[in-house]
Image (cartoon, rainbow, N blue to C red):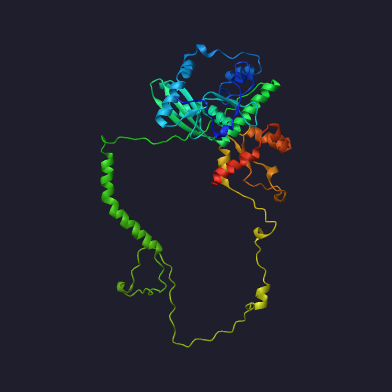
Amino acid sequence: MTNHTNSVNGGALRRINSAALSKHNRRHFICGSDAQIIMGKDEKALLRLWREKRGEDTAPDMSDFPIVQLGLVTEDLNRRWYELNSGQRICDVQRHVIHRTIPWMAATLGGLVRETGAVFEAKFMLPWSFSDEAAAEKHMAQLQHNMLVAGTKKSVLSIIDGGGKLVELSVEADPIYQTILIAAEKAFWRAVKTGETPVLFDCEPPKPRIEAVRVVDMNASNSWAEFAGLFCETRQAHTEHERATDEQTSAPIDPTPTQTPSASTDADNPLRPRGRPRKVKAVAEQSAAPPVPSKPTIDNNPPPTDLQADAAPTKIDKSQLTFGEIRRLRDKAHLKFVASQPCLVCGRSPTDAHHLRFAQPRAMGRKASDEFTVPLCRTHHRDNHSFGDEVAWWERRAIDPLVTSRMLWVSTRGIP
């Protein structure tokens, strides 16, 4: 066992007393398990959580749920197994922290990996309903919430199933999903304060980056041996065919003219070379008569003098001026990527790539650059255009679209 009292990152995380997050005061914060309900698809659980935060209902007693008690009992065993297999230490177990700038965002961490600073979460799942993808999708909102609160970009999900199997998943922070998560939690917290009934965001969690490698034993099949023999037999012919194709493609055109075919005998007719067709102009027969001098032609466009050449206008590179030319960036692939993301307000799909016109320079007029685009569903897209004041429309929803548009642009352009 390790000493679970040391902190990471120089003690940068804010500590709060355990009593501050007791069952009586949990309604003053949104924790990782609450984020899992807010980003889930159970409307009844969302309404029950909303009533608990408003003090109109009490939290259910989990002591009667065996699966919950199994998760609590196996947490210590899960940490010890992870430390034994990875060689890394888990510190700050059950540490209560709150977000640096959002006072109602809090988390009870399952631990922090001392060497990497990653958030550690220990879970228990039944073996007949377990898969790596399903486990990561189920706990994605809680992991992303805890990474936001802890100020780290990595997390480790360690799971023990009922069959005695230990599974370790590494999940990294997703800036786009975290932006939607903050927007959903802000909307839920606003509903708690105002009394409005909350609605589900119905946002699909990001797919975890799990190794998609499968080992298949083909010893009992002869297909691979047959394909290998066929490849060995046809490899030389394939190589010669590719070389001949490259030679024909790169061969230069012969500038010398061919003989004009005559109708006397077949031997006088030259054979047409195989390969690319070549356009050859026939040479006209020269007559014995002396050539007739042609009339002198008058050149109406004499070559310019040195003075005229110096005075000729040249194209100015406007990008080198003090005030460079404003360029409109167009990228259809980026717009398609933005439209594939969930709505920035409600998290629904499909969406449209909405251009942030207030972020465009005034010199561009009604033109818009694809650099400033965010995903909006059809309902919020129409509401944004009909509202009139786009800046006020985003402020009412407590969302900064410029940050999301920049992250989307960086992700598609490959900017480090």
| Identity of the residue drawn at 35% across and 64% down | 274
Residue furthest top as drawn? 64
Where residue 14 sits: x, y (%)? 61, 29
Where residue 47 sits: x, y (%)? 61, 18
Where residue 253 sits: x, y (%)? 41, 68
Which quadrant of the view contains residue 323? bottom right
Which quadrant of the view contains residue 285? bottom left
Q: Is residue 378 above or below residue 108?
A: below
| Identity of the residue drawn at 44% across and 84% down | 287
Total numbered circles: 0
Q: Which of these two is toward me, 271 or 18?
A: 18
Q: Is residue 43 above or below residue 245?
A: above
Q: Is residue 330 above or below residue 302?
A: above
Q: Which of these two is toward me, 114 or 196?
A: 114
Where residue 355 sits: x, y (%)? 65, 42
Q: Which of these two is toward me, 79 or 282?
A: 79
Left or right: 60, with 264 as reference point = right
| Identity of the residue drawn at 54% across and 30% down | 7
- Residue 243 in view here: yes
